[in-house]
Image (cartoon, rainbow, N blue to C red):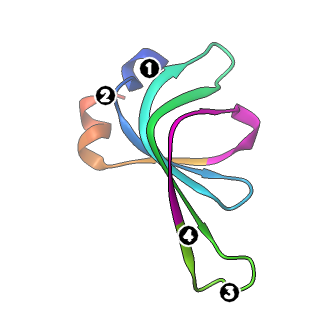
Amino acid sequence: MTPEALIGTNVKIALKDNRVLDGVITVVDPFGNILLSNVWESSNDKIDPETLHTRELGLVSVPRNTIDEVFMDKRSYEQCNI
């Protein structure tokens, strides 16, 4: 599988600091860093963990070393021919 197969795929990326980014993969560089567009960030409140905060970020560069897990829906996975 090449990174180009993932371009245009809607993914959720769990970061090591417990935030989750939801967006569309625009670019994957040779080092595994990802550029996402149309990004929404979700995170739990540090004082009240039951409270979820969301905000729109737009275009975000995600360094490879900050990524914990990457999720995509089954249909997108099958369309990528991975």
From the image, give the main secondary structure of the stretch colored magenta.
Answer: strand
Locate residue 15, reporting x and y percent: 66, 51
In the rendered image, which residue does mark 3 sit on? 48
In the rendered image, which residue does mark 1 sit on? 1
Q: Are marks 1 and 2 in contact (CB under 8 Å)?
A: yes
Estimate the spatial distance between the alpha carbons at disc 2 and disc 4, rounded to whole Å. 31 Å
Kindly identify the residue that appears in the image at 60 percent across and 16 percent down.
29
Which portion, as a residue range, is magenta?
Answer: 54-68
Locate residue 62, reporting x and y percent: 64, 35
Asked if the stretch drawn in magenta spans residue 55, the answer is: yes
In the rendered image, which residue does mark 4 sit on? 53
Identity of the amino acid at label 3?
Answer: Asp
Q: Which mark is residue 75?
A: none
In the rendered image, which residue does mark 2 sit on? 80
Mark toward the viewer: 3 or 1: 3
Task: Locate the N terminus and report the quarter of the image it occupies.
Answer: top left
Estimate the spatial distance between the alpha carbons at disc 3 and disc 1, rounded to whole Å. 41 Å
Identity of the amino acid at label 4?
Answer: His
Q: Are marks 2 and 3 in contact (CB under 8 Å)?
A: no
Relative height, residue 34 to residue 54 (above, below): above
